Amino acid sequence: MIPQMLKFRSLLILAFLFFATTASSCAQEKPKRMIQGASVKELVPESPNEKEDGISQITIGQLFKPGTTEYTRIGMAGQKDAPPLPTGYVLFKELVFRVKTEAIISGDELTVFKVSSAENETDFRRLEILHLEEDEMSPSGRSWTPVTVVPGGWDDYFHFVSKEQYEAAQPEFQSRRLASVTRDFGTFLIALAPAFETPSNGPFTQIEVIPSSSPEPVALGEEVTHKIVVKNKGPKAAAEVNLKVDLDAFFGYKGSSTQGACRRSDQSTGTILCYLGAMQPGSTAVITIVGRVVGQPLLTEGINERGSMLEVVFKASPTDLVEGDNQIFMRFNFKILKKP
């Protein structure tokens, strides 16, 4: 009796391992290689399957050195360390892809997806391609960005992709085609966008930003202190407030805040990023940036006016997409005295 029970348990274990392996292989497929299409900048799958979801074509903006390009369907498991999807978006049928290339490229990439599993036009019209991108204005350093080709979208941006190519890649249910324009490859996913978009009637709350500098003017070699006061004037709480300052004419500067944290950008030594977290109505945060003004060849004798750029993003929910109503762009000036 006992040997039969052991044999039964062994069969169960083998069955479990088989299904676990099968599930794992379904979650992340083998890479599919892309080969040259109509031109050296056009790539198509080496072994296309019209009935599968996947990438049907890639157009590279500028190609400096050819190299192997491939994509893999990685599913949810492949994006487990990524930030949450934007508010209201739902992943569609585990369609998460990672695209890699050994080629040296630049400019825009037009990536065309075939979504054969979209069974009805209603769902297809809601599909959106999201791209995982570096985002210094997010505390996680990355965010999902909508990159779907849409009617009239070419006019909104400067593209290496021609207008004719862009318009020819607009969503089409008949062929189940969706396309995106991005500055690089990496991770893409296809999601159902929120069914109903609430029209914007302005920012959800009022954020006020008041910058100042002292001393005024500051002499070469002296320290200058920038103070940036951020207020939530209501009526609603902001779940996340993030700030970026692009500085001019400093070295050895440092930033601090009465709430949250500030750090220097990894991409630019002249940029400070501050993540303030949530701000309730009526609350105030004060950011202090101290630097020492150094000599520059362009400074003339007397008083020179210099400027710094300031950007603020505030969200009702940390997963909200950034809308124009909830951004503030500001330039604030300070004066430098160069003595003869």
Image: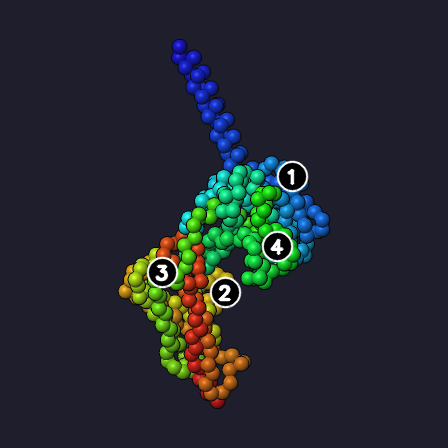
Residue at 39 percent across and 67 percent down: it is 255
Color style of the picture: rainbow
CB of mark 4 within 8 Å of CB of mark 3? no
Residue at 61 percent across and 43 percent down: it is 175
Q: Nearer the viewer, mark 4 or mark 3?
A: 4
Q: Residue furthest bottom?
A: 340
State the image coordinates of residue 202 (x, y, percent, origin top left): 39, 63
State the image coordinates of residue 92 (x, y, percent, origin top left): 49, 42
Label 4, label 1: how many angstroms apart (C-alpha)?
24 Å
Quarter of the rendering containing residue 228: bottom left
Label 1 sits on residue? 48
Q: Nearer the viewer, mark 2 or mark 1?
A: 1
Q: Nearer the viewer, mark 3 or mark 1?
A: 3
Label 4 sits on residue? 167
Whether residue 118 sits left or right of residue 201 in the image: it is: right
Label 2 sits on residue? 268
Amino acid at dot 4? Glu
Closest to the observer, 32 or 102: 32
Question: Helix, strand or loop at disc 4?
Answer: helix
Rendered image: mark on residue 204: 3
**Which tag, 2 or 1, sits closer to the chain's start?**
1
**Which tag, 2 or 3, sits closer to the chain's start?**
3
Label 2, label 1: how many angstroms apart (C-alpha)?
42 Å
Q: Nearer the viewer, mark 2 or mark 3?
A: 3
Question: Helix, strand or loop at disc 1?
Answer: loop
Question: Helix, strand or loop at disc 3?
Answer: loop
**Which tag, 4 or 3, sits closer to the chain's start?**
4
Whether residue 244 sits left or right of residue 96 in the image: it is: left
Residue at 61 percent across and 51 percent down: it is 169
Amino acid at dot 3? Phe
